[in-house]
Image: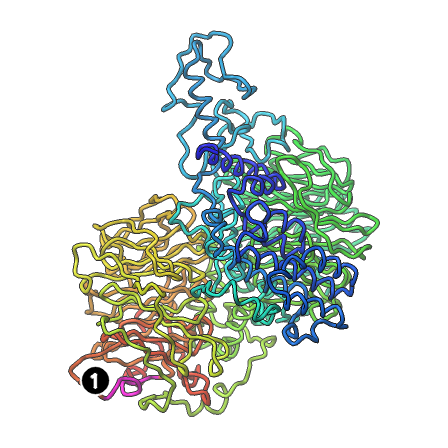
Amino acid sequence: MSSLSRELVFLILQFLDEEKFKETVHKLEQESGFFFNMKYFEDEVHNGNWDEVEKYLSGFTKVDDNRYSMKIFFEIRKQKYLEALDKHDRSKAVEILVKDLKVFASFNEELFKEITQLLTLENFRENEQLSKYGDTKSARAIMLVELKKLIEANPLFRDKLQFPNLKNSRLRTLINQSLNWQHQLCKNPRPNPDIKTLFVDHSCGQPNGARAPSPANNPLLGSLPKAGGFPPLGAHGPFQPTQAPVPAPLAGWMSNPNPNPNPNPPAISHPAVSGSGIGLCGPSMPAALKHPRTPPTNPSLDFPSGDSDHVSKRTRPMGITDEVNLPVNVLPVSFQGHGSSHTQQPFNASVSVSSSASDDLPKTVARTLNQGSSPMSMDFHPIQQTLLLVGTNVGDIGLWEVGSREKLVLKNFKVWDLSSCSMPMQAALVKDPGVSVNRVIWSPDGSLFGVAYSRHIVQIYSYHGGDDVRQHLEIDAHVGGVNDLAFSHPNKQLCVITCGDDKTIKVFDAATGAKQYTFEGHDAPVYSVCPHYKENIQFIFSTALDGKIKAWLYDNMGSRVDYEAPGRWCTTMAYSADGTRLFSCGTSKEGESHIVEWNESEGAVKRTYHGFRKRSLGVVQFDTTKNRFLAAGDDFSIKYWDMDNVQLLTSVEADGGLPASPRIRFNKDGTLLAVSANENGIKILANSDGLRLLRTFENLSYDAASRAQEPAKPTLNTISAAAAAAAASSAGIAERVGSVGSLSGMNGDTRSMPDVKPRITEEQNDKSKIWKLTEISEPSQCRSMKLPENMRVTKISRLIYTNSGNAILALASNAIHLLWKWQRSERNSSGKATASVSPQLWQPSSGILMTNDVAETNPEESVACFALSKNDSYVMSASGGKISLFNMMTFKTMTTFMPPPPAATFLAFHPQDNNIIAIGMDDSTIQIYNVRVDEVKSKLKGHSKRITGLAFSHVLNVLVSSGADAQLCVWSSDGWEKQKTRYLQLPPGRTPTAQSDTRVQFHHDQIHFLVVHETQLAIYETTKLECVKQWLARESSAPISHAMFSCDSQLVYASFLDATVCVFTASHLRLRCRINPSAYLSPNVPSNANVHPLVIAAHPQEPNQFALGLSDGVVHVFEPLESESKWGVQPPAENGSTSNAAATPVGGSGADQAQR
């Protein structure tokens, strides 16, 4: 087959996948043998579809092709055999032995005999080599690791594991270009040609005298596509009239749309949850990064969809779109001995399987709350993700800070203005005053929340932080119950959408309450609404109790859709967080429950998930999270599914006490799950990130309670600002929040907090009365380790732990990178970085070093910078020359780009799309660069000197920048517009020097950030860009060289140019421990050498571990003594009451300053 024909096959594969012809895609992959789809292979192995696994493999290799192929087939058939034995299906096991495994007897007869003898055992685990065989799921996962290594090493798979670098919808683009050219050649071209077939060349019919516009400026074509992909044929074909802008994904569902009254609806600004869609980029959620499915060299072929602009773009060879498919713990993979290792250990199943995907699900009961009445609906605040809104069966509204377990607000149902209500409603309330909440929901920015009641009305409250909840709107919306409520942004205007027993859907202005639309057409009470948008098109899905699904545009032109939902009764619909996948959950009157994924373009069920109880004892509720998981409350438990697998992933009973069909709700990041429980309870389930988030509040609860008893001292706890300022959005509510300086306590008021049960720890009772600073001056007073040196390195410029926590990466001033790795051992069972065991200064077998381009400059004089990808696979780095992208496994340079000038001075990966990086420049600009398409998307201007710090908040969707000009800027990461700017508050008489860096780092809450300057440490609240805490170094003391939060944001580690290291309590920036140079510097270092720390790094999982990079090229790792377990004792609050006045040091007493 010619190379062009081969490329055509790849184009067809891409087209088939975009059109969701999944089975055909894999059939063509197998028959052509051009591309081995590792993700599909992996899924089939996980599901145990052995016939399909071998059939798929047969397109690429046969059993006797080579030793790698032989072992691949052997491992698969051995696993199939063991599973049959495990099920005590002897006849099946014998059949596998004879048909599948006997072929290997000629190569290793002893092995075959040993396998045969397993039939005589009651449990094959009696065989010593199989004694550690776990369950089927773990055994398949272990085998898959081995299979992937064998496939990667097998020469028959060479060049078949990477899909070509294609732009989206490439085949469509070529067809469109052909049609455009044909149209240009028409003798009598029409302005709006009607393309009805591709079977013959296009030719315009009736002459109309119009000249053919050239392809370059043809208004029908629009601009030629960039890497985002050409719009697909159909709803966005090149010759479609510009009226009726219904997006392609809705083309099937809205087949005959009436022209929209607004032919060019404005683009609505929505926070993009993910800059990448399905495919090589995969989902960008943390779960996918922590628990990948494919090895680095095997990106999956899940092609990008052409459905929306923000789906992934096809990678360039140097792109890092397989980021999410790479292991977190990236170590060199050795393929030596693949052929011989098997005969020595034929049943090697003792490898511990890595954490499963379900580890990222919130399953641990972290809080149990009592609402006082039965919860009917719950919703977490979109920004302050531990703030939970609850509506109950008696009409009560509760607002909880689940971190501190405090009930901030409890409101009983009442009609605000009965006189303005309709007569039917007044009569209904007189007849039966009982009212239940059907739905509570926050607005997208968290400044409003809505409550839908079982009687006629909707109430909208405005939220101003803490317990400040105010009446905003009361709407007599429907006759009968209001069954659902949602917020949306049609025409850039916030609206409230309701549905009710009167069979209608209504849209109201969220500011004034004015009714804008009424949608009629359902023949039964409307049960739920799901507003959404694709590209510029806003629409609403609705479901009714007769099982009908309809879709509406904001145009009063009637429904575009009339489909039936599985269950045909109570159905709710929801999109994945990135808006690319549509799901519904329904329960029939007979108790049959269904969760399905829909194919929007066809209005057909694409996937039905299994695992429900045969007869559900109530209406099942569901939710989605992380673009990856589904959850539903059923059978007295919470059930979880992976979106890509119809089989139940896991279920959790949450320590029991759940109702038959519990109500559930995830927070935005998917780290917490609220679950309704019996006896008016609410359980908060958390994953590891959620537990850390909640611990933030636990550690502050004592602080908050003690301060709340001192109203005479207006103080502010660092995280307390979140209750007021963070809950306020930058789009208006921030202006309504009062001065945060007067707030106190966790929820921003001066009330005592009886619900808070502070942990009375050692450092919070008697010791606090006799507190004194912990001084460490001797090596025996802490654990420290000097890491193995590289003689070529003279100064450490940048330092970071890998995200897995088992290695440290440094960038030296001579542009060389150093990587120290800790290995698992008897002394270090976790394999994590530690000060107790020495690591290896690691290099690949090739012996190459990761060395940056240094251009014409002296690297020692250049500003060095680097950024590590979230799963440790790549490092982006610069030392005054071009930016380099290195593979952390091989140290190879994957690409270089952006030659100076200007030179890069700071780098940061976008938290939700690893192909987007923010690059700070020495000319004071910030460039937003897409690695995959090699294009600068935006250039941000606002600083006057070089950029010295960048930090993203994925909660607020902002980028914070800092510069050598001592200026801070906040930029929207959606549109990259500048939101706020402020200059650092320097002590009187001190001006920033040309060399003074200002660094920024976000707190764990993603709302506050740390600012580090040679003169000070400060904590800022982002939405107002206000300094809420500040610690000033005395003018006579050494300048600060660097500082970092600990991984849990409870501590701040700061290094100074006199080689001192200080540990602060982050909540009020009080000094708690000082490490003097004599504790770690060698006595052989001459006093005039001026060796001092330049950079500091915090361990990503161990909050009491940090590392220092020194000016002599040495790196030290520090931990407290095991007997102490932490750095010093937290200073008591009474000694550390602070003012939020910008220039006042924390603990502003002279004594505290003298200590530094």
The kind of residue tagged 1 is Val
Instruction: Give the percent coordinates (x, y) of residue 697.
Output: 52, 72
Query: Is 1084 rendered above or below residue 497?
Result: below
Q: Is residue 1076 magenta?
A: yes
Q: Please name whichever residue, 578 or 486, is drawn nearer the observer in this view of the structure.
A: 578
Find residue 259 and report its horizontal and vertical position in percent.
Answer: 57, 25
Of all residues shown, which one is farthest toward the right? Answer: 590
Q: Where is the C terminus found, in terms of image quarters?
A: bottom left
Q: Look at the image and tell me whether residue 581 can be seen.
A: yes
Residue shown at 44% from the left, 83% from the top: 1126
In the image, taking residue 1048 as reference, residue 686 lies left or right, namely right
Q: Residue 612: within the magenta?
A: no
- Image coords of residue 368 (percent x, y): 66, 71
Q: Position of residue 968 (x, y in %)?
A: 31, 59
Q: Is residue 961 visible?
A: no
What element does badge 1 sit on?
A: loop
Q: Which residue is mark 1?
A: 1085
Residue range of the region highlighted in magenta in the rendering:
1074-1083
Total labels: the figure holds 1
Residue at the image position 43 percent from the left and 48 percent from the top:
974
Q: How is the image coloured?
A: rainbow
Q: Is residue 759 above or below residue 584?
A: below
Quadrant hosting residue 953: bottom left
